[in-house]
Image (cartoon, helix red, strand yellow):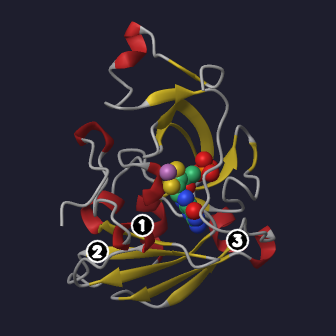
Amino acid sequence: MGKFFHKPSDELRDRVPPGQHLATGFPVLTYGATQHIEPESWQLQISGLAQPQVITWHDLMAMPQSSFTADFHCVTTWSKLDVQWQGVKITDLFQHFTIEPTASHVMQHATGGYTTNISMEDLLRAENFLAHKLDNQPISADHGGPVRLIVPHLYAWKGAKWISGLEFLPKMELGFWERNGYHHRGEPFAEERYSDR
Ligand SMILES: Nc1nc2c(c(=O)[nH]1)N[C@H]1C(S)=C(S)[C@@H](COP(=O)(O)O)O[C@H]1N2
Ligand SMILES: [Mo]
């Protein structure tokens, strides 16, 4: 363990949530099999309480592109600061379809069957994005390429790798880890790791 994790220095400590250690490198954390998807065959299905539609790789590339520097916190206690991504802001993506005002929550769906739930309030923030580049390169399959969701203010399980759908819901439903005992929201500085139900 000592080889792979180290204690944060003083100036970084306030960016590392309680119970977390800095990881060296960028570990891969996947439940189940890595998905291999060609960019040209990637699609995002918009469903539920929204105008149904399919967003293709071509559509995504035509949207405004942004660069992001974001801290990454895995609930298994490792964090990585200042990860460099490129992609499309959720606020820009949401210009492309209408969402019914009764939609309060969203289920993220991923190829391979992973799901994770998030509230509209937590999803619709300026710092959230669909990522397609990591360190200036296409995201590798292990890290969720060609497209994954990143929600920097929540634990990283709240961003689906190989994202394939956003389903807009009238109330909270639980995703894969949330049904298996993880917290419904997952805010790292509040250590929202496990469900209290
Ligand atoms: N589709 C899918 N997305 C996922 C996961 C997964 O198993 N499948 N794991 C989550 C968890 S727990 C974490 S910490 C991050 C890990 O991303 P990484 O493998 O790029 O480090 O992806 C999240 N998104
Ligand atoms: Mo994680």
Residues at marks 2 and 1, CA–CA distance in whole angstroms:
16 Å
Toward which corner of the image does residue 98 lie, by quadrant? bottom left
Q: Which label lies toward us, 3 or 2?
A: 2
Please identify the residue farthest to the top as the structure is shown: 10
Task: Check mark 2 vs ligand 1: CB closer than 8 Å? yes or no.
Answer: no
- Percent of width and height locating residue 62: 66, 65
| Label 3 secondary element | helix
Position of 132 relative to 168 (above/below): above
Q: Is residue 101 left or right of residue 92?
A: left
Q: Residue at x 33, y 75 (%)?
A: 174
Task: Check mark 1 vs ligand 1: CB closer than 8 Å? yes or no.
Answer: yes
> Which mark sits nearer the N-terminus, 1 or 3?
3
Give the residue type that dot 1 points to: Trp
Instruction: Inspect this view and state whether residue 144 appears.
Output: yes
Q: Which quadrant of the rendered structure holds the N terminus? A: top right
Residues at marks 1 and 3, CA–CA distance in whole angstroms:
28 Å
Give the residue type that dot 2 points to: His
Q: Which label lies toward us, 1 or 3?
A: 1
- Percent of width and height locating residue 10: 38, 8
Q: Residue at x 20, y 84 (%)?
A: 102
Q: Are marks 2 and 1 in contact (CB under 8 Å)?
A: no
Residue under numbered circle 1:
177
Q: Are marks 1 and 3 in contact (CB under 8 Å)?
A: no
Looking at the image, which is closer to me, 153 or 44? 153
- Percent of width and height locating residue 65: 60, 52
Position of 66 relative to 93 (above/below): above
Residues at marks 3 and 2, CA–CA distance in whole angstroms:
25 Å
> Which mark sits nearer the N-terminus, 2 or 1?
2
Residue under numbered circle 2:
105
Looking at the image, which is closer to me, 93 or 118? 118
Give the residue type that dot 3 points to: Trp
Residue under numbered circle 3:
57
